[in-house]
């Protein structure tokens, strides 16, 4: 008499796998929308310049303290604005990477995070 294995033993259920994939996709889309709507702030030179942007990298505000403005050194102000923008982008990207990593279990999925 030949022993039988329980039904489905040793083989993944393709329907269950597809449900898991769909569930992960839904969670990823929800988290992406949440991160895109969130605001991030970047600063430069002790908050002389502050930039606020969304998770979609859309700048929503730029604040410059009067003492940061030197008509004889516009290049410094330009550098401060660039540094503040880069700081905000970095904050948004770092959080997106961390949050997506939690959802994907560290898998490197193209187009995510």
Image (tube, rainbow, N blue to C red):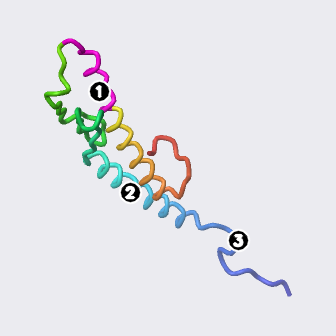
Q: Earlier in the sequence, mark 3 or mark 1?
A: 3
Residue 87 screen position, x and y as percent: 35, 37
Residue 10's disc is 3
Residue 75 screen position, x and y as percent: 28, 15
Label 1: how many residues lie within 10 Å, few (<14), some (14-19) or many (20+)?
A: many
Q: Which is more toward the observer, 28 or 82? A: 82
Q: Quadrant of the C terminus?
A: top left
| Occupied quadrant, residue 13 | bottom right
87 horizontally vs 64: left or right: right
Residue 26's disc is 2
Q: How far is mark 3 from mark 2, CA to CA?
A: 28 Å
Residue 65 screen position, x and y as percent: 16, 31
Residue 55 screen position, x and y as percent: 30, 42
33 horizontally vs 27: left or right: left
Camera-side mark, 3 or 2: 2
Which element carries disc 2, helix, strand or loop?
helix
Query: At x 54% / y 63%, what residue is drawn?
Result: 17
Q: How far is mark 3 from mark 1, CA to CA?
A: 60 Å
Residue that mark 1 sits on: 80
Which element carries disc 3, helix, strand or loop?
loop
Query: At x 22% / y 33%, what residue is drawn?
Result: 48
Label 3: how many residues lie within 10 Å, few (<14), some (14-19) or many (20+)?
A: few
Query: At x 53% / y 65%, what residue is drawn?
Result: 15
Q: Is residue 99 above or below residue 54?
A: below
Q: Is residue 28 magenta?
A: no
The magenta stretch spans which residues? 72-85
Q: Is residue 77 magenta?
A: yes
21 horizontally vs 44: left or right: right
Q: Is residue 89 above or below residue 29?
A: above
């Amino acid at each position: 008499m030949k022993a039988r294995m329980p039904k489905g033993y040793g083989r993944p259920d393709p329907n269950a796998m597809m449900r898991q994939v769909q569930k992960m996709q839904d969670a990823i889309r929800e988290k992406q929308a949440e991160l895109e709507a969130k605001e991030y702030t970047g600063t430069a030179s002790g908050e002389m310049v502050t930039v606020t942007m969304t998770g979609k990298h859309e700048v929503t505000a730029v604040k410059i303290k009067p003492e940061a403005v030197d008509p004889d050194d516009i290049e410094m102000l330009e550098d401060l604005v660039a540094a503040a923008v880069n700081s905000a982008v970095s904050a948004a990207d770092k959080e997106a990477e961390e949050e997506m990593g939690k959802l994907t279990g560290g898998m490197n999925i193209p187009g995510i995070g």
